[in-house]
Image: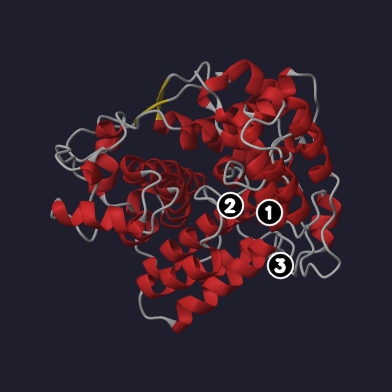
Amino acid sequence: MADPWMELGFVMRAEIEQRRQEGCRVAAAEAKLKGLGDHPTQSDLEHLFDELQALQPQKDFPYEEPSDLQSIRAARPDGPRRFKVTFAEPELHDRILGGWLGRCAGCLLGKPVEGWTKERIEGYLKLADAHPLRDYIPYLVPHRPECVMHPSAMEATRGHIKGMPRDDDVDYTIMGLHILEEHGLDFTTRDVAAEWLTHFPYELVYTGERIAYRNLVNGLTPPSTALYRNPCREWIGAQIRADAWGYVSSGWPERAAGLAYRDAVLSHVKNGIYGEMWVAAMVAAAFAEKGVREVVKVGLSEIPSNSRLAQAVRRVMSWSEEYATWQEAWKQVVEVYGQYHPVHTINNACLVLLGLLYGEGDFEKAISIAVMGGWDTDCNGATVGSIMGALLGAEALPLKWVTPLQDRLKSIVVGFTECAISDMAGRTLAVAKENLSRG
């Protein structure tokens, strides 16, 4: 089976765009690639790739985007770092369970339409008499091209859900918990790498993660695994791995972001790292703050203030105050950030924000908006559902979103093929209690 992430011509084109986004001049590289014709040799591509990777951002590039933790923390704004809150064990368990359930429900909602545009999703929902979203997406017999879903989508549609089916968004949450149980709170990035190699099938990880996996097999070590021939190093893959670190760091956003950093640098750099740190900090803050806007601000305080991601977060927060509807703000997001790949960190982070901010504290409204915006719908629904679930707690989640989950989830993580969601939450609670006991 062809693997586009290993095909150098594909990777080369994606790398040119990545370097452009990082502030480098790429016109000469584009001209050289065009001059190589339709069938460039492997050697020619290798040489051109080396030239691309040697480029530096232009001096007038307006962003500061380090990839080492010390510099990231030096470039972040002031923040609470850790809240002075004490959780009774039943409440902490309820909030952690809420995060797990919310993540599964949001992921399920977006799974059938993953990768679709907003317009295609809207058209499908209107055909199904399900617009705007108020429940899981119904399945339509695909009598039109725009109705055709991925073959695995039916198990995530209304009336066909029998637990949480396998999805990488939940695989990574399980993996985070496993890493913490296996290696403790002082795990290293190399520990993360070891667990990937022994617990993930290669062909069921994607984009930046698959490239990092290949680099590990070929003998590279972090942080080189994130850099070598990896044009997906700022895509959404790290951002969807954030949640376990937030669950176990309830009310301690700096701790959550630090754990997320150790995980992210295996496969990502710059805004790819910040996406995971931002979400982990928001999840942790959701246990302590009362409102969504405050949660977002806490997440923002753990990433460099002069990064592209931080700028995007601030812009969407401003748009949410300027525009009455999420659709109006969505148009601004597309105009400013629509040039990014559909699974990039920055544009999808904007849709996460639309769900959180325009959801106004309502779980159903929040995950529905995040999914209706398009792009990486299952990832965005999962992230919003996780934050809202941790903010509200399991007892407050609407039954129509929780009951179809049947307290069951499937995974490709070795040793976690069939799990009870409640068991995952209980095990997460045990790690959280250990973490929170640290000074």
Which residue, given by chain and number where applicable, does mark 2 sit on?
345
Q: Which amino acid does label 1 sit on?
A: Asn
Which residue, given by chain and number where applicable, does mark 1 sit on?
271
Question: Mark 3 falls on what kind of element?
Answer: loop
Q: Nearer the viewer, residue 104 or 432?
A: 104
Question: Mark 2 falls on what kind of element?
Answer: helix
Q: Residue at x 40, y 33 (%)?
A: 422
Per the model, the C-alpha gap separating discs 1 and 3 is 19 Å
Q: In which quarter of the image is residue 231?
A: top right
Tell which circle, 2 or 1, labels the residue nearer the N-terminal end. Answer: 1
Per the model, the C-alpha gap separating discs 3 and 2 is 22 Å
Compared with 331, 228 (above or below) is: above
Q: Residues within 10 Å of mark 1 (few under 14, many from 20)?
A: many
Tell which circle, 1 or 3, labels the residue nearer the N-terminal end. Answer: 3
Tell which circle, 3 or 2, labels the residue nearer the N-terminal end. Answer: 3
Q: In this view, does 140 lie to the left or right of 234?
A: left
Q: How many labels does the image show?
A: 3
Q: Which amino acid does label 3 sit on?
A: Gly
